[in-house]
Amino acid sequence: MLNQLTQYLQSTVTPGQAGSMLWATIYILVIFAGISLCVVFINWGERKALAHFQIRLGPMRVGPHGLLQPIADALKLLLKEDTIPANADKVVFWVAPFIVTTAAFVVYLVVPFGPQHAVTDMNIGILFMLGVSSLGVLGIITAGWASNSHYPLLGSLRSSAQMVSYEVAMGLAVISAILMTSFTPGSGSGTLSMIGIVEAQKAQGVWFLFKFFPLGLVAFVVFAIAMIAETNRAPFDLPEAESELVAGFHTEYSGFRWSLFMLGEYAAMIAVSSIAVTLWLGGWMRPFPNLLSGTNWDTIFSLVPGAFFLFLSAVTLYSTARMPKKLTFRIQTVGLGAFGLLLGAVGLVMLVPGVRERVQDIFWFMLKVAVFMYLYIWYRATWPRYRFDQLMRVGWKVLLPLSLGVLIVTGVVGLSPELMTWLKGVL
Amino acid sequence: MTTTAKLDLNEDKTFLDSTELILNMGPQHPSTHGVLRVILKLDGEKVLGAECVIGYLHRGVEKIGENRTYVQFGPYVDRMDYVAAVSNGLGYCETVEKLINVEAPPRAQHIRVILTELNRITSHQVWLGTHALDIGAMTPVFYCFRDREEILKIFEKYCGARLTTHAFRIGGCQWETYEGFEKEVLSFCDFFEPKIDEYEQLLTTNRIWVERTKGVGVISGADCIMLGVTGPVLRGSNVKWDLRKAKPYSGYEKFDFEIPTGPNGDTYDRYVVRIQEMRQSVRIIRQAVANMPAGPIMAKVPKILKPPAGEVYHSIEAPKGELGYYIVSDGSLQPYRVRVRPPSFVNLQALDQMVRGRLIADVVAIIGTIDIVLGEVDR
Amino acid sequence: MALAPIFRKIFLVDLIKGLSLTFRYQDPKEIYTEQYPLERPQVAERYRGLPRLKMNPETGKTLCIACDLCAKACPENLITVESERDPVTKRKVLTKYTFDLSRCMFCGLCEESCSTDAIELTPDYEVAQYSRDGMVLDQKRLEEGPDRKEYKR
Ligand code: SF4
Ligand code: SF4
């Protein structure tokens, strides 16, 4: 046991590459549980943040500031009656939410939370990710079709068209980032591996966001827009546009199956955000690796995650102490206190040297993803929704030419030293 | 002019076999503003025709009017256009005053103007919030309702109710203004003008908003007049018609304000018109408060109101358009007939013409831009 | 050349303007929500809420003279006043007064018509009851006012 642990702590590759079935399984389980937990709390965070944008309070009653609301929601959804419309295609209706959720979760096989923290590292990683994540649309179409009802049908038709057209722009933007990996001095060949892409950014000493300014930025913006459309979020949330199509493709769903859709949607949001983080924002790398370099800074930055968790734990314990001392609040108080202690324990473990170096990558990665989550909510709070034809126009007439142009210019700029020497030779 | 195509709803087919899709929007739908049911005939997402089915909120207000005395009918009119209850009350009171040939004293008229203009603002705020919500912007509705709250507080302090105010009585007003009324109204004006800028900051230049509203639901001024459409919808189609200027009532001729119009008659123009109207309302309120005369607030009206036999039609510019009352009196205590010309109901008739050839998403935008209140459509 | 609009378009100025506004409103100080049962709003003095029948504070007798004006004024006919003549003073004495709150629309016509200010709509806005019958208030309940439990955490 201990042997395996030390072996794990010393390994420099992902468990998949090391061929360690045990650790790969553990990783899969941890990621599945972790992402589900994240989704639950992003849901809380979204309601809370959205409320604050809209000068409301959001959930306030279950636990302090509604912190336990997601648990109550999850319980409610699980216990709710699960209805299937009489004329629905039962089998397909049943399968559809699982397709969405599975597609959203399989993607995490290759997401690099750190240089060793991925289930495996495929040499076609990014391709795999794009491919699998677009399978989710299959679930949406089948859900809309199987419901045998007007609104879901329209919603699923919209979403299929939307996802297919934004996939193109998204793919081209991704290619321009991949192209950048091939400009690593001394390597000369690019990579599709997710870990390899981050390593390339490390070797070139720049996040691809800032590479060939503003080319990286433009590609990133294109991707950032396309990924909102891919995940059906505002202002591109047409498939579930609630003011038009009631709830779009999941109008007929309820209870557990509906919650699977939500799980899938949020998991997909995290997944595409992590693609963006990996490709343009330096993946797991800590901020300012060039500006604040040196072992001292390394140590300081590696202490941040633990400190962050300890801070969270302190806040939670403080509000536990402030819970009303009534019998009816006993369960909530105990639950909250336990949660605070858990956070504290996690924080302490993260301060242990040896562990902390390994774990900080995950922290930085998740932090960057969290920024994206915030942006998602912010957009949703601010902007109106596009109309279907306008959405298509933005996809095909704005984003596609833009990403294509960026791709070409990136290639030209990247090859410019070679081009110059070639030109000199010709002249 | 197009007439509504008859929709054949009894086709013996499931919708999957046909090329046309019949979609029932409402009566329970998030953005039909109540219990409006719109039967849409679709080709894919394109709308081939629309038919409105109304009456889900019919309470027989006109019939109730025949069974109540003139004074007793007062509170019922508030329940028609419940977001603009004060305007409804003003219209009714003025009509009966015309029937019995009295005029409210100047002070009462000023109070009436202030309250109705405040009410116009609340109505437009509700419209703006829900309209933006239909188009997908979730946040303006909360900002609008927050600012509307300030007006409702003034209403509450003045007449004791926030929504169905029953603020005016035949012959004037029931209540004298409370202490600090003028100051509160003026401070609301100062507070509110920057808020309009905020709504505009969120929407007016926003490219998504502009794309969603420009060129959507176009209706020409001539068509508007033919259909009897009034209010901001008419003014958005570049027809400068406002009863406050055209047939001044309640002393509106004393105030200096403009009638905003839009050039194209699309959803965006109607949006701009309503935003401008809010600004103009603030302007009117400022003038009304500044020139508030002293004096009585109630004209001499007999305690037992028995108008002479005859009939009368009077209309006012409610926030949604021309609100008219037609009352026939047979000389008894109760009206013989009360007929209301509700702006929402008439404006709704333009829906079919506006949505033809547009997409589903435009239908909700257009229902929003007509600004209907189902309580008034169905009465 | 009108370059400014083009620049504004490319750099998404219109979208960012909106974002900045919503960002500003995140300030917890801007929150407008009232947590109702915990914070009770103070309504205005003229608020038309739960009806009360007033008593003479000195004698503890009702102010109502059973003139029936309120019942006549009410558009919904929901007030019933029953009285009998006092053989001694020859005055009408109130015997029964019921007020069907479930049909009341709080228009205030009854209190306006009352010549002794006996019936009054008070600023008490919590009028919900557990049953329809509970909405029919008799003289006793109108005089004593509601008995309800306050919500406390
Ligand atoms: S408030 Fe109006 S409806 Fe209620 S009892 Fe008095 S007169 Fe009747
Ligand atoms: S409450 Fe007032 S109006 Fe009604 S019967 Fe009594 S005294 Fe008359």
Image (cartoon, coloured by chain):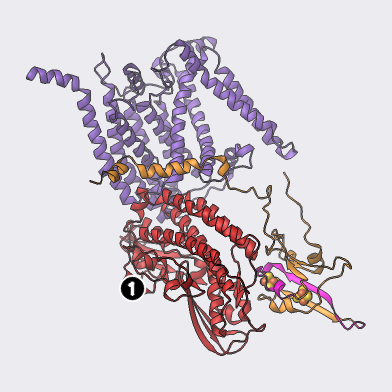
Foreground of the two, B183 or A235: B183
The percent position of residue A371, horizontal first and vertical second, equals 45, 32
Image: magenta residue range: C87-114
Which chain comes out orange in the rendered image?
C
- The shade of chain A is purple
| Tag count | 1
Residue that protrudes farthest toward the left in the picture? A427
The percent position of residue B247, horizontal first and vertical second, equals 44, 76
Say which residue appears at 23% left-offset and 23% top-offset: A414
Query: Mark 1 highlights which residue?
Result: B3
Which chain comes out red in the rendered image?
B
Q: Is residue B72 magenta?
A: no
- Check the image and report above or below for B2 versus B197: below
- The amino acid beneath tag 1 is Thr
Foreground of the two, B48 or C6: C6
The percent position of residue B248, horizontal first and vertical second, equals 46, 75
Can residue C61 be seen at all in this image of the molecule? yes
**Is the residue marked 1 within 8 Å of ligand 1, measured from its CB?**
no
The percent position of residue A164, horizontal first and vertical second, equals 31, 42
